[in-house]
Structure formats: structure tokens, C-alpha cells
Amino acid sequence: MADDMKVSVGDMLLTLTGNVSDARKRLDTLEGQKLKEELERLSHHVGGLKEQLAAISEAFTQLQAEPEPEPEPDWPGVSPNWTDDLDQDQARELWDWLTAWCQNVLWPIYAQDVWKPCWYRHTRVRIALTSLRGAHQWSYETTKVPPTRSLEWELRWWPQVEELMKKELKDCGMPSDALARPKHPIPVPKQPTVEDPNPAPPPFTEKDFTDPGFFDYVERNIARRRSPDEERSDS
């Protein structure tokens, strides 16, 4: 009887030991799985932090870097050159660029007193107006510029061109300007008479921006230049 009890107790201890060992293995497995999941979660979190830190570092580096220069303006740019080997497309763009500004800004605001409708026929005047327009763009139309630029345009560049226009255009105008033979005469309005109380107005007057020959002159100036497909003469 005692031997049977010894066998039974021994079997029970063996079984218990096996169960404990099995339970420990399962516990180790469960703990290992939880630890693996936790490590994966932490790894993913750390990866996200690394990406954020990299982005912050890059942004900080850009802030410390030297500011990029302003992009160069599109052609015709700040100071186009009429004597350059322009092709027909460039010449037309330059004419449009200059004429639009003169008609909408310079003539009505600044130059009424010195303007003559034949201005475009005078090469020196046209070149000076082109530079003046470029200086105006540089002073008023370019971002992030000091206020001294516009002040310099008002007090220095425009007054100098104004004096040039007075000298260059002094031989052009109305007979009332006391010119016996004006270089580019402006037609005199006809005075009403008994026979013709409503005479036709002249084709243009001294108050006009250009005379009627402007468009033909521009087209001839453009036509004499090389086509856009031809190479520059200095290449």
C-alpha cells in the first residue's frame, strides 16, 4: 500500500513539475510576444521622431543659409539696348514695353510740358526713355528695394531726361514756337471762317502722344532687323 502511495505521489510530482515547466514556457512565450510588440511599437515611434527631427534640422539649415538672390527679370529686363543685335520679336517686345509705359505713366504724369508727338523719331530720346523706363522698373516695380531708389528716379533720372528732351525736341513743333522751318511740324488747327465755320480738325496736335506716322515707323524699324530664326551677327 505504501509503495502504491509512493508511486502515486511520484507521478503527481512528475506531472506537477511538467505542468509548471509547461506553464513557464507559455509565460515566457507570452512575455516574449508582448515584448516584441512593444519593441516594434517603440521602433515605429522612434522612426517617426527621427523623420520629424530630420525635417526640423533641414528647415533650420535653410533658415541659416544665405538668402537666394532675386530671379533676373524676363527680357527686355532693366536696361534694354536698341543698338544690340535684336531680332524682330525682341524689337517688337521692346517697342511695346517702352511705348505702353510712356503712354500710361510718363506722358500723362510727368512729361506733358516737354512732349512732342514725334518723340519716337529721335534716336537719342528713344534710348534715354528706354533707360528711364528701366530705372523706373528697377525703382518702383522690383520688390524689396530701398525707398531711395524711387527718390533718385524722381529727383535725378527723370529731370536729366527731361532736359535732354527739351534740347532734342526744341526744333520740332508748332509754328507758334517761332520756328521758321520746324524739323517735325505739328499741323496748325484751321480757324473758323464765314465760308467754313466748322473746319476739319488737324490729324494730330501738340497734345497727342504720337503723330500718325508712329505705327509705320515702328513696323519699318522691326522689319529691317533679323528674323528670330537667324543667328546673331556676332556669333
Image (cartoon, helix red, strand yellow):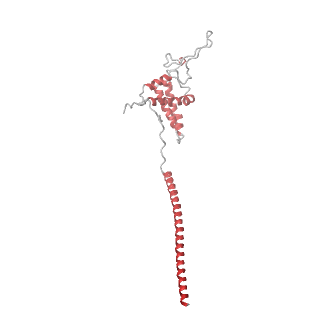
Q: Nearer the viewer, residue 205 or 31?
A: 31
Residue sitting at the far bottom: 2
* Residue visible at 54% across and 80% down in the picture: 15
Residue 110 visible in the shown view: no
Q: Is residue 119 above or below residue 235?
A: above
Residue 37 position in % (x across, y down): 53, 65
User: Does residue 234 appear left or right of residue 27 in this picture?
Assistant: left
Quarter of the image for the N terminus: give it: bottom right
Residue 127 position in % (x across, y down): 46, 29
Residue 225: image quadrant is: top left
Q: Is residue 225 above or below residue 73?
A: above
Residue sitting at the far top: 195
Residue 43 visible in the shown view: yes
Residue 100 position in % (x across, y down): 53, 30
Q: Nearer the viewer, residue 136 or 235?
A: 235
Q: Is residue 193 above or below residue 78?
A: above
Quarter of the image for the C terminus: give it: top left
User: Does residue 88 appear left or right of residue 34 in this picture?
Assistant: left
* Residue visible at 47% across and 24% down in the picture: 219
Residue 224: image quadrant is: top left
Q: Is residue 11 above or below residue 188?
A: below
Residue sitting at the far left: 235
Q: Nearer the viewer, residue 34 or 13?
A: 13
Q: Nearer the viewer, residue 73 or 3?
A: 3
User: Does residue 85 appear left or right of residue 146 in this picture?
Assistant: left
Residue 168 position in % (x across, y down): 48, 24
